[in-house]
């Protein structure tokens, strides 16, 4: 099966948008890339952008986050389509969450079976009938996109619970600009560093605060969480508090945080932990990470939670196949981005068909994320396939099967500095407040092993900087205009005019001759 | 103390502060200029052209990369980091008996490290970033050594005074070059201005308004809790002169500084949020220039005044 390479045409010549990039990469050469790679690792260790690879002998081993130095380039036109498609999809998903916890019209219409919705592990009865401010549930969304063999963009997975990775998008860009600025020379790349401001604005816009500026907090499970770096990063970049459960308390259905000046109200919470753990009174009773009474406060409308509780029902892999139907049903529009063909195994006929060709399909558990439990048929051996057959037969509702997508490739720097094609996907990040904003590009994840299709960073994946180009002439790089006033000349640029010193200078000049001759 | 020594220390402080400011600004502009404009909102832009204009060194023909290069290691450009550090070194050499050996070494090492193209690898396009990083680290070290090892006497006062006046002057210069004037559509986010002075994090902690041009300018002008704001610098300047001056009650620079501090405080309270700030920037900068002159006349026996007037 042919792969779609994003840098090169099938005949090996660079694609029109990447011609200059390829030339710059060649000019840099393997040694240049290796050298930049060494500096990258040093910078990432220094800045603490690392992830832990298991604790051996009691000590944790930190590795720099694997950023590949070859960027991925998307034209402005291509990006506009993706952006429109994503905004449409996220709007539909948001409608779906609202519908599931209210009138359930889509179920009554017979489009989505209720059995499937109610069986979702993330379906939350506790929030039935609650409508958050602005009707927004999916404040932060990250849909995973892939490119087919012919280059078509498809959605492979939706993430509307707590999608992570945005900090790496920002850090990757900052690192690329420092490590290989020469690659940027022929391009005008859209910046990404305004994301925290977008998020803050969205959170403020949904916060129920009449009198004053809303207080926003980021809620982390704690420093032991693998994504703690991102939580701290976002809190710092937004200039808000990073809180843990012990900092929060609910009194009379209002959420407060404990400060040195007593209790202070929090109006909006960007929470980075699963529904299961947020409130021991409503969800898992054994959760030590939760705040008792939070759901009551949420129900009372005194606090906005992003993303809302119960949104997990919309990114369940079993529900995924119905998203195109949702777009038609709620928005009356034709889906702009396609789904990957998916088989629901609860249907006996479909199951029969799928079980017959398990070696050609990908099988995924519906309620999991992060690539856990996924079996890729063509890469699995007979024993694994046999085991999967038994597991699926035992509980078919918990599994879906998908066609194998031949993920597109982008050349990636190998161990010796040489370029080798590796498979990639793309996770753009959307922020839904008063409107939907999508940061140009997103997190490109790359499978670092040859032929591998698994891009999850927990399983040996790396990442790439993703460039969305500005339209228009790339050569046009006129600097920004300068305001009219010219400040006065710098005060004396020599070392003042101390006469004694001038004499000294004169002496020196007399000895060495006038400077510059 | 000797007027000459005070004068040298004052300029040592100014040159060190200028090198540091240049390094921060170059780093921010370097990063920003590689990328295009945001697709959602344009925001305030501050590029290498603006940076050169700040130093009164407009070069129409220069490409952005070259322009930043000129501000890093080009000894021929008076605004470059290398030139500032070299001047600081020259100054430090003439007051070696007053500053500690440790501090002299720190300054000397910095100058040596920047000479002749700097460290290996700085010739690469990423060198601009590496050089600014180096200067930032070294100046932090020099100020750290000074704060730990220098006696809190007149000498330290003049060193600090130079640094403070230079920082506020640079901030005002930047605001004057970069603030959009009379064009409300250009009032987008002004992250670049905060990054250029290293005040990004402080702003986010101190101000709830989004980092747009107006609130950012107000912050850089008036926020007393932020040490590099103009108001904070002027306050500290007042303290410094109060303790250095033999007769502060009738000393021209002290009076002028305390009037400026009161003025800034008044403007902060009196001005509405959306007020145009470029006028105040201009006034304040002129006032600082007068202070600089008063300082020269009172403490340096008027010797520097001729050079200042140019």
Image (spheres, helix red, strand yellow):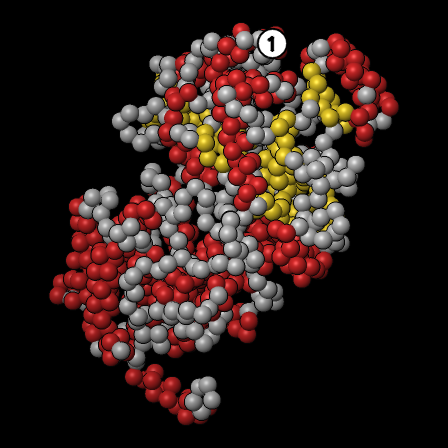
Residue in the picture at 36% in, 65% down: B53
Q: Residue furthest right?
A: A382
Examine the image and state in which quarter residue A449 appears: top right
Q: Nearer the viewer, residue B72 or A107?
A: A107
Q: Is residue B264 above or below residue B293?
A: above
Q: Is residue B56 visible?
A: yes
Residue in the picture at 42% in, 20% down: A135
Q: Nearer the viewer, residue B91 or A161?
A: A161
Examine the image and state in which quarter residue B163 appears: bottom left
> Counting other residues with Cα less than 10 Å from the Cα at mark 1, is it few (<14), some (14-19), or many (20 or more)?
some
Q: Mark 1 highlights which residue? A: A113
Tell whether A342 sits left or right of B19: right
Number of numbered discs overlaid on the protein picture: 1
Q: Is residue A107 above or below residue A243?
A: above
Image quadrant occupied by the N terminus of chain A: top right
What x and y, as percent, mark residue B161?
Answer: 29, 64
Residue in the picture at 66% in, 59% down: A23
Q: Nearer the viewer, residue B121 or A346?
A: A346
Chain letter for the residue marked with disc 1 in the picture: A
What x and y, as percent, mark residue A21?
Answer: 63, 55
**Please, what secondary structure does the residue beneath circle 1 have?**
loop
Q: Is residue A220 visible?
A: no
What x and y, as percent, mark residue B94?
Answer: 39, 78
Residue in the picture at 55% in, 54% down: A187
Q: Residue furthest left?
A: B250
Tell whether B195 sits left or right of A24: left
Q: Nearer the viewer, residue B80 or A242?
A: B80
What x and y, as percent, mark residue A496?
Answer: 31, 76
Q: Is residue B291 above or below residue B266?
A: below
């Amino acid at each position: 099966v042919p792969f779609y390479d994003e840098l090169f045409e099938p005949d090996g010549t660079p694609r029109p948008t990447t011609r200059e990039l390829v030339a710059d990469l060649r000019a840099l050469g393997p040694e240049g890339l290796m050298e930049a790679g060494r500096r990258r690792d040093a910078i990432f260790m220094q800045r603490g952008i690392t992830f832990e690879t298991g604790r051996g002998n009691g000590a944790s081993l930190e590795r720099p986050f694997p950023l590949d130095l070859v960027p991925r380039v998307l034209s402005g036109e291509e990006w506009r389509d993706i952006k429109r498609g994503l905004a449409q999809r996220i709007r539909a998903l948001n409608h779906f969450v609202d519908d599931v916890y209210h009138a359930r019209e889509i179920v009554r219409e017979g489009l989505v079976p209720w059995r499937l919705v109610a069986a979702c592990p993330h379906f939350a009865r506790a929030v039935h009938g609650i409508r958050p401010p602005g009707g927004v549930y999916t404040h932060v969304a990250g849909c995973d996109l892939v490119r087919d063999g012919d280059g078509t963009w498809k959605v492979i997975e939706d993430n509307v619970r707590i999608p992570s990775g945005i900090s790496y998008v920002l850090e990757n860009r900052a690192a690329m600009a420092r490590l290989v600025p020469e690659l940027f020379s022929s391009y005008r790349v859209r910046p990404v560093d305004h994301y925290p401001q977008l998020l803050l604005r969205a959170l403020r816009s949904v916060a129920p605060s009449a009198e004053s500026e809303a207080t926003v907090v980021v809620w982390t499970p704690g420093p032991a969480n693998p994504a703690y770096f991102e939580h701290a990063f976002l809190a710092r970049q937004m200039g808000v508090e990073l809180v843990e459960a012990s900092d929060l308390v609910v009194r009379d259905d209002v959420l407060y945080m404990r400060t040195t000046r007593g209790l202070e109200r929090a109006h909006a919470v960007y929470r980075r932990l699963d529904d299961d753990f947020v409130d021991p009174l409503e969800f898992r009773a054994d959760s030590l990470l939760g705040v008792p009474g939070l759901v009551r406060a949420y129900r009372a409308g005194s606090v906005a939670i992003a993303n809302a509780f119960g949104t997990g029902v919309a990114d369940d892999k079993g529900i995924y196949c119905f998203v195109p139907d949702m777009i038609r049903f709620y928005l009356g529009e034709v889906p702009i981005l396609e789904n990957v063909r998916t088989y629901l195994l609860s249907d006996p006929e479909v199951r029969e068909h799928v079980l017959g060709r398990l070696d050609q399909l990908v099988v995924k558990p519906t309620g999991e994320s992060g690539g856990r439990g996924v079996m890729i048929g063509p890469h699995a051996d007979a024993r694994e396939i046999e085991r999967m057959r038994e597991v699926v037969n035992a509980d078919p509702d918990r599994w879906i099967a998908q066609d194998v997508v031949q993920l597109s490739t982008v050349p990636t720097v190998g161990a010796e500095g040489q370029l080798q094609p590796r498979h990639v996907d793309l996770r753009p990040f959307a922020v839904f407040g008063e409107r939907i904003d999508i940061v140009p590009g997103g997190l490109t994840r790359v499978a670092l092993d040859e032929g591998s299709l698994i891009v999850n960073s927990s399983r040996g994946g790396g990442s790439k900087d993703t460039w969305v180009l500005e339209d228009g002439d790339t050569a046009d790089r006129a600097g920004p205009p300068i305001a009219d006033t010219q400040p006065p000349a710098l005060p004396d640029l020599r070392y003042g005019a101390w006469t004694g010193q001038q004499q000294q200078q004169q002496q020196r000049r007399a000895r060495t001759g006038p400077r510059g001759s | 103390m000797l007027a000459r020594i005070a004068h040298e220390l004052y300029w040592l402080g100014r040159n060190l502060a200028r090198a540091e400011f240049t390094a921060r600004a170059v780093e921010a502009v370097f990063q920003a200029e590689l990328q295009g404009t945001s697709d959602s909102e344009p925001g305030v832009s501050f590029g290498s052209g603006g940076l050169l204009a700040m130093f009164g060194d407009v070069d129409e023909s220069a490409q952005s990369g070259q322009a930043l290069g000129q501000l890093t290691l080009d000894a021929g450009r008076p605004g470059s980091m290398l030139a500032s550090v070299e001047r600081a070194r020259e100054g430090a050499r003439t007051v070696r008996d007053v500053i500690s050996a440790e501090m002299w070494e720190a300054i000397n090492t910095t100058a040596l490290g920047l000479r002749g193209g700097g460290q290996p690898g700085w010739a690469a396009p990423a060198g601009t970033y590496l050089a600014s990083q180096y200067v930032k680290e070294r100046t932090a070290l020099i100020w750290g050594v000074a704060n730990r090892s220098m006696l809190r006497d007149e000498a330290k006062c003049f060193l600090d005074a130079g640094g403070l006046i230079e920082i506020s002057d640079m901030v005002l210069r930047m605001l004057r070059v970069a603030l959009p004037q009379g064009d409300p559509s250009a009032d987008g986010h002004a992250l670049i201005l905060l990054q250029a002075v290293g005040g990004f994090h402080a702003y986010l902690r101190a101000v709830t308004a989004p980092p747009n041009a107006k609130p950012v300018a107000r912050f850089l002008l008036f926020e007393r809790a932020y040490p590099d704001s103009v108001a904070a610098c002027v306050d500290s300047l007042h303290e410094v002169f109060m303790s250095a001056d033999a007769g502060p009650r009738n000393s021209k620079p002290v009076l002028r500084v305390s009037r400026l501090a009161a003025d800034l405080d008044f403007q902060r309270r009196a001005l509405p949020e959306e007020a145009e700030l470029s006028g105040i920037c201009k006034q304040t900068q002129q006032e600082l220039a007068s202070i600089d002159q008063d300082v020269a006349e009172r403490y340096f026996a008027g010797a520097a005044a001729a050079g200042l007037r140019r």
